[in-house]
């Protein structure tokens, strides 16, 4: 199993913006066949060190995660949207 996690800080930290971002990320479900798991969470603690939105994706292998990265829906819909709404992001990728 390969896991890809991304944390996003949004430019607009309103509840509406966070909900829209969560829905956009969840829209990958069923559209990208390499995804074996998809979870999106919005931070509730809101501490100084918190990020706003977490994306957790799971794949059968690193190769499938790399295929997801270049999938037309991910490249054409998700990446442009996330670049437009994010102030910063941090990621971790690991095998388990």
Image (cartoon, grey):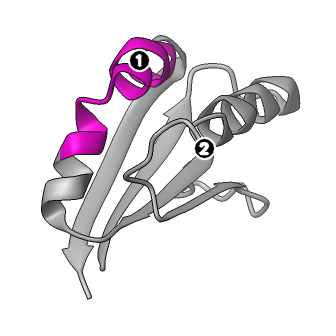
Circle number at residue 58? none
Q: Which quadrant of the rendered structure holds the N terminus? A: bottom left
Nearest the eye: 78 or 59? 59
What is the chief secondary structure element of the magenta stretch? Answer: helix
Q: Is residue 11 above or below residue 34?
A: above
User: Where on the picture, by quarter, is residue 30?
Assistant: top right
* Residue 15 x/y as whole percent: 85, 33
Which corner quadrant holds the C terminus?
bottom left
Residue tagged 1 = 83
What mark, if any, has residue 30 been given in the picture? 2
Residue 90 at x, y = what percent? 33, 49
Q: Mark 2: few, some, or many residues within 10 Å (few <14, many ≥20)?
A: few
Instruction: Determine whether the residue tagged by mark 1 lies in a helix, strand or loop.
Output: helix
Q: Residue 40 versus residue 9: which sits nearer the camera? A: 40
Q: Which of the two discs, 1 and 2, sits closer to the camera?
A: 2
Q: Is residue 90 above or below residue 18?
A: below
């Amino acid at each position: 199993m390969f896991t890809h996690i991304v944390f996003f800080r949004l430019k607009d930290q309103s509840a509406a913006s966070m909900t829209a971002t969560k829905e956009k990320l969840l829209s990958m479900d069923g559209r990208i066949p390499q995804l074996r798991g998809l979870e999106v969470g919005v931070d509730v603690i809101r501490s100084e060190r918190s990020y706003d939105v977490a994306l957790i994706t799971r794949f059968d292998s690193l190769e499938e995660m790399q295929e997801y990265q270049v999938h037309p829906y991910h490249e054409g819909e998700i990446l442009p949207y996330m670049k437009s709404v994010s102030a910063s992001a941090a990621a971790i990728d690991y095998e388990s």
